[in-house]
Image (cartoon, grey):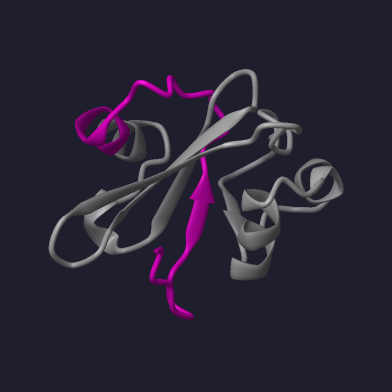
Amino acid sequence: MIAMNRRTKIFISKEPADMRASYDSLYCKVKDILQEDPMSGHLFVFINARRTSCKCLYYDGTGLVIVSKRLEKSLFCKINPYHPGKIKLTQAEFNLFFEGADLNKRFIESPAA
C-alpha cells in the first residue's frame, strides 16, 4: 500500500527504466535523473521502454519501498521526453495512470504542473 498525503509529490521519470532495477539503482536514478531527494517521502515512478511495467519508489520513514505493476492487456501512458521541466502528477492522476488510463493529453499538451 502506498501511503500518500496532501504533501506527497509524485514525479515520473521521462527516461525508460530497466525493470530489473532495485532499490539502489532506482535511488540513483532519483538523485541523478530526477534530481530529487529519494528520502523525501515523495513518490517516484519509473516505466519500462515497452510501457508494460512500472515501478514506484518511496521512503516511508523506516526504509525504501518499491511497488511494481505489470499491465496484462494494455500499456501505461506514453511520457513525452521533451516535456519541459519535471512531470508531477496529482494523486488522482497517479491513480488513473496506475490503472492504465490514457493520460496522453496531460503529458503532451499541458504545461508542467
Of the 4 image quadrants, the one containing the C terminus is: bottom right
Picture coordinates of residue 7 (x, y %)? 43, 77
Picture coordinates of residue 30 (x, y %)? 34, 40
Residue 96 falls in which quadrant of the image? bottom right
The answer to whether 1 is drawn above or below residue 38 in the figure is: below
Q: Is residue 14 magenta?
A: yes
Could you tell me what secondary structure mostly forms the magenta stretch? loop
Residue that extends furthest to the front in the rendered view of this protein: 72
Residue that extends furthest to the left in the rendered view of this protein: 62
Residue visible at 81% across and 41% down?
Answer: 108
| Left or right position of 105 against 22 | right
Picture coordinates of residue 10 (x, y %)? 50, 58
| Left or right position of 62 against 107 | left
User: Which one is nearer the viewer's eye here, 71 or 32?
Assistant: 71
Of the 4 image quadrants, the one containing the N terminus is: bottom left
Residue 15 falls in which quadrant of the image? top right
Residue visible at 80% across and 51% down?
Answer: 106
User: Which one is nearer the viewer's eye here, 97 or 90?
Assistant: 97
Residue visible at 27% across and 51% down?
Answer: 65
The answer to whether 34 is drawn above or below residue 32 in the figure is: below
Residue that extends furthest to the bottom in the rendered view of this protein: 6
The answer to whether 18 is drawn above or below residue 12 in the figure is: above
- Write down the region rendered in magenta: 1-27
| Left or right position of 22 against 88 | left
Residue visible at 31% across and 34% down?
Answer: 26
Q: Is residue 49 magenta?
A: no
